[in-house]
Structures are given as C-alpha cells and as structure tokens.
Image (cartoon, rainbow, N blue to C red):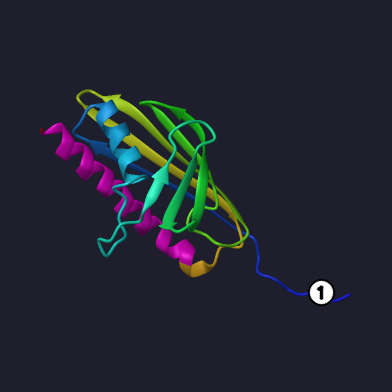
Amino acid sequence: MTAAVGEEVQSVHIVQQIEINAPMRVAFDAILEELGPSGMQPDGSSMNWKLEAWPGGRWYRDLGEHKGHLWGHVQVIKPPTLLEIAGPMFMSFAVANHVQYRLSEEGTRTRVTLTHTGVGLIPQDLREGMTEGWGMFMNSIRERAEGTAKH
C-alpha cells in the first residue's frame, strides 16, 4: 500500500451585494439570463450555459455534440426572491459549492446578495480570483436588469 500526500482541503466564503435600479422580477430574470443563454466569458464570447430553472434542474455548459461541463443543480428556486445552486461550478476537481442569490426590494430598487460557500481541493490561485469573477458577474446582472427596466 502506498500513501500520497495531497493538497489541503480549503474553503471559500464570498458575500457580495449590489443594488439594481429595477423591479425585483426584472432583476431575477436578469440572473436567469446571465446563468443561461446570455452568460459571457471575460473576452466577450458566449459561455454556452443552459439553466433548467426548476428544482433539480441542471446548470451546465453546452459545448455541442454531447460535450460540456456540469456546473450544478438548482437546489431552491422561489421567483423572484431566491435561487440556490449546488455543484462543482467552475471547478473540475474534488469540491462542493453552494451559491445563493437572494433578492429583496429596497424602495424602487432591488438588492441582490450573492453568497458562495465552497469546500474542497481548491487551488490558491483560483480562490484569489473568485471575488473579482463574482464581481464581474454581478455587474453583468445589474447592467442587464437596468437596461431591461429602461425599455
């Protein structure tokens, strides 16, 4: 029998909030769009995401010809106030992640709180980039929702 020394199990806990000048339903729909067909990579190319917006539904990246990546499953969906997804997300190694989008009305605005909790063999460089990545994603949600609300 041989034993190998592996990486240490790491955890992440990220909480980000944004306020959006749009009704809560518009903001929720913007989240679904960004997690689905409108999701983009930083270079502007499509992520080719599909989101099955029901309990147990898959969130995955469709690369065509039966290729792709499972990012998670819808754990909870209560439009327009709550969406929770659990799964590997953007990590192709031994991890467990949970991402929650909680929406609340603040007058004529909507507050979106994103909470990402994860545990597993998460490399340091990936952990360091997560806050910025989620920030870019939240800004995309805001831009989409506010653009929709103006029309």
In the image as oriented, which residue stretches furthest toward the front? 65
Per the image, the residue denoted by label 1 is: 3
Residue 19 falls in image quadrant: top left
The answer to whether residue 130 is magenta is yes
What type is the residue that disc 1 sits on?
Ala
Residue in front for this viewpoint, 5 or 28? 28
Q: Which quadrant would the C terminus be assigned to in this image?
A: top left
Boundaries of the magenta span: 126-150
Image position of 49 with respect to 129: above or below: above
The answer to whether residue 77 is magenta is no
In the image as oriented, which residue stretches furthest toward the right? 1
The residue at 16%/32% (across/down) is 149
The residue at 41%/63% (across/down) is 129
Q: Is residue 85 left or right of residue 19?
A: right
Residue 133 falls in image quadrant: bottom left
The percent position of residue 99, horizontal first and vertical second, equals 48, 43
